[in-house]
Amino acid sequence: MATITAPQDVFIKPGRKPPQRARRWTRSRLKRAIPAWIGIVVVLAIGIYPVFWLFVSSFKTQREFVQESTFAMPESWNFDNYVEALTTGDLARNFLNSVIVTAPSLAAILVFGLGAAFAIEVMVWKGRNLTLLLFLSGIMIPGQMILVPLFIAYFNMGISGTYLPMILTYAGLGMPLTVFLMTAYFRSVPREIFEAATIDGASMLRSFFSIGIPLVRNALFTVGLVQFLSIWNDLLIALTFTTNPDLRPIQAGLLNFSGEYGQVNYGPLFAGVFMNVFTLLILFVLLNQRIMKGLAGGAVKG
């Protein structure tokens, strides 16, 4: 009868050194991993150092910006620049204006864009391909070309000097890309799911709210973040439709730190930019898992 014996190097007694072959394998693996780790450190340095430099610069005085080296550390770490940015620069009001403009614009883009994508891709009706083509043609139109006609239209409607021109413009410009992306995500959902729901007696609205939205929930977060960044970081539309300085969002409000003759108040400006960047970083950290799932979901055919 044949007997089975265990290899001698499988069991290692406590206190004994591992076999020489295992140590050579570890060194070889370490040699292969070193270039990858060096590359990761370089990429992290390239990504993190600008944020660190922005944070450090937000504590410098005007004299340090003008006379000292660009990469020098600040002499003191007080928050005078942040206080001046929020009070004298009225940056707190600009943050509030950005929230007032971004929230309804983003809600309109997601609600109407998601509904249009569901109707185009899931429902069967005549003319849906032409409708999708019309939405896609909106991506090709540069936003700069329609600003003057929109400004005249808003003035004739009597809504100039309010938040409505910015909200309507952001919602309209964000619809084509949202419909295009959400249509692609709905295309990856198996049709058998909606057919089974219809056989069970579910209406189209029930299928949309109970099946369609939960299945593309992560993709909705991804598209929502893309549109949020596009609206929050916009400067052109904000400058075009805000004749009243009290309505300026954050990006246009940063121009308050520039003087009439090109003189820039660097300390409060860097403090304002860092607060804006830090807010966006916090939002990305909170939603990064859903964003990754949404990107992966669109690449897999269900």
Image: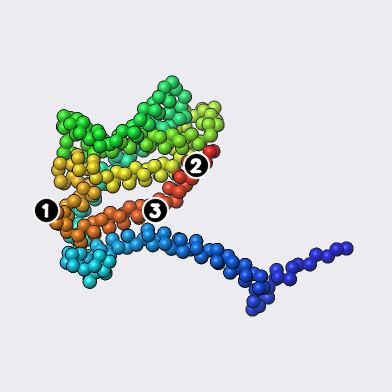
Question: Looking at the image, which residue is at 58% across and 69% down?
Answer: 27
Position of the C terminus, as image quadrant, is top right
**Disc 1, SS:** loop
Q: Which residue type does callout 2 highlight?
A: Ala
Residue, disc 2: 299
Image: 130 above or below 282:
above
- Along the polypeptide, which appears first: circle 1 or circle 3? 1
Q: Which residue type does callout 3 highlight?
A: Leu
Q: Observer-nearest residue: 199 or 259? A: 259
Question: Looking at the image, which residue is at 49% across and 45% down?
Answer: 296
Q: Which residue type does callout 1 highlight?
A: Tyr
Image: 146 above or below 98:
above
Question: Looking at the image, which residue is at 47% across and 32% down?
Answer: 207
Tell me residue 123's x, y (percent).
46, 27
Residue, disc 3: 286
Q: CA distance from mark 1 to mark 3?
A: 41 Å
Q: Observer-nearest residue: 30 or 288? A: 30
- Local packing at callout 1 (Cα closer than 10 Å; few below 14, some 14-19, many 20+) is few
Quadrant for residue 168, please give it.
top left
Tell me residue 133's x, y (percent).
39, 28
Tell me residue 179's x, y (percent).
39, 34
Question: Looking at the image, which residue is at 53% across and 31% down?
Answer: 191
Q: CA distance from mark 3 to mark 2?
A: 23 Å
Q: Nearer the viewer, mark 1 or mark 3?
A: 1
Q: Is residue 115 visible?
A: no
Name the mark on residue 261.
1
Tell me residue 78's x, y (percent).
22, 68
**Disc 3, SS:** helix
